[in-house]
Image (cartoon, grey):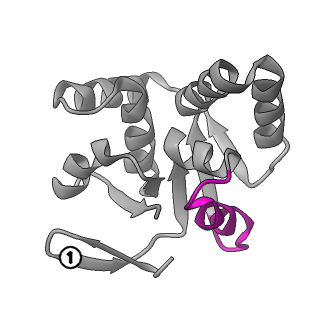
Amino acid sequence: MSGELTGPGRTRSLSRRFVLDSFALLTLVQDEPGAQMVEDLIIAEDTEIFISSVNLGEVLYVVQRHFGEQAAVHVEKRIFDTPKVKVVEASWARVKSAASLKAGGGISYADCFGAALAEEMDAVLVTSDPEFRRLESEGKIRVAWLS
């Protein structure tokens, strides 16, 4: 990871708070390109890592669909046994924020929870999902793009 965040007309140092979206967690779980970046963020001493419970639920259903229920249970246990990763429940304020982001179109409702959490926590969203490009270009969220 370069340590810099670039977007339309800006470069700024990355925050040390990160929100993993479902793509980021699936990248790690399936050891896909970008997994090392996610792992490095989790093990770094100076980072805070969050994931929306809605995004974690999305990961669990994808894992269960492709690899079975036991694999999903393993992923769930692994996340909750990793003290560094904080699973954040969906508050009513975040539900409304996600709904507002969804109303703008072009992004799934589940993804809106990750974006709303990143916005609320003033954190960088970690993803490889192109649906977030619009929100990044509008300055609503900061994104660390996985390879």
Looking at the picture, tell me which residue is in the foreground, 27 or 89.
27
Q: In the shown orientation, is residue 126 left or right of residue 12? A: right
Q: Nearer the viewer, residue 25 or 147?
A: 147
The reply to whether residue 60 is visible in this rendering is: yes
Residue 134 % position (x, y): 19, 48
Q: On screen, 123 above or below 109? A: below
Q: Residue at x 33, y 28 (%)?
A: 108
Q: Residue at x 63, y 66 (%)?
A: 41
Q: Nearer the viewer, residue 79 or 24?
A: 24
Q: Secondary structure at mark 1?
A: strand
Q: Does the magenta portion include 37?
A: yes
Vertical relation: 86 (above or below) 71: below
Question: Residue 68: x, y in percent?
Answer: 75, 20
Disc 1 crowd, CA 10 A, few/some/many (<14, 14-19, 20+)? few
Q: Which residue is painted at 38% across and 42% down in the image?
A: 115
Res 98 → quadrant: top left
The residue labelled by disc 1 is 10
Q: Is residue 59 left or right of residue 77?
A: left
Q: Position of residue 84 (x, y in %)?
A: 74, 55
Disc 1 marks a residue whose amino acid type is Arg
| Residue 22 located left or right of residue 73 | left
**In the image, residue 75 lies in the stretch drawn in magenta:** no
Up/down of 92 relative to 35, above or below: above
What's the magenta region?
31-47
Residue 21 appears in view: no
Q: Tell me residue 132's x, y (percent).
A: 30, 46
Q: Is residue 121 above or below residue 36?
A: above
Q: Residue visible at 42% across and 57% down?
A: 122
